[in-house]
Amino acid sequence: MAKLYFAASLFNEMELAFNALLAGRMREELPGLEVFLPQEQGEINDKNAYADSKMIAKLDTEAILKSDVLFAVLDGQVIDPGVASEIGVAYQAGIPIVALYSDTRQQGGAHPEKLAALQVLAESQFSYVNLYTVGLVKLNGKVVASSSEAIEAIKQYI
């Protein structure tokens, strides 16, 4: 059975619901795929309980290293620091990475007014994502723009 590690921020209702929904889709559309979703790991992610940094790092790193592919959500104001760390672990271990970057500000990339706005201080119409982290993904996998594309890309690695 192929194993996937699901790296995503998990600190509010919106993130938790999205992660659960997409992990459910993966389990349904990719039979035989075991999805490790950190928010389901109560021993370290029950925020009413206690887990120190070493407990979290040990459990998540062991799960990444047992995975055949890492799926990472890059969306947000910035890439979640934990997700960036998980990408780094997967990259170093040679584990393929599929990353979701669905920021809608990337649309209209050829629009002349959007391109002209790049020359005006503080008027970029496009989002920014850390290029080092994205580079690690691209060196060992791919970045996709939708959940459906992510599921298709994961098929290549399982």
Image: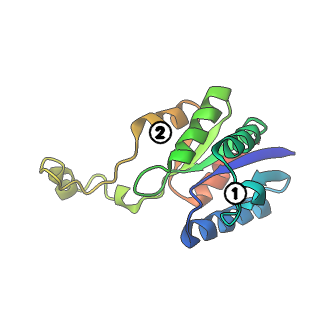
- Is residue 80 toward the left or the right of residue 148 in the image? left
Report the disc number at residue 50.
1
Residue type, label 1: Tyr
Residue 89 position within the rendered picture, expressed as x and y whole percent measured from the top left: 63, 33
Query: Could you tell me which quadrant the C terminus lies in?
Result: top right
Residue at 56%, 46% (x, y): give it: 82
Q: Nearer the viewer, mark 1 or mark 2?
A: 1
Residue 134 in the image: x percent, y percent? 47, 39
Q: Nearer the viewer, residue 145 or 40?
A: 40
* Position of residue 127 measured from the top left corner of the image (x, y, whole percent): 34, 53
Q: Is residue 13 left or right of residue 27?
A: left
Furthest residue in direction left, as rendered: 120
Q: Earlier in the sequence, mark 1 or mark 2?
A: 1
The residue that mark 2 highlights is: 134
In space, the residues marked 1 and 2 are separated at their CA atoms by 32 Å
Query: Which quadrant of the view contains residue 18?
Result: bottom right
At horizontal 76% and vertical 60% (from top left) the residue drawn is 42
Res 156 seen here: no
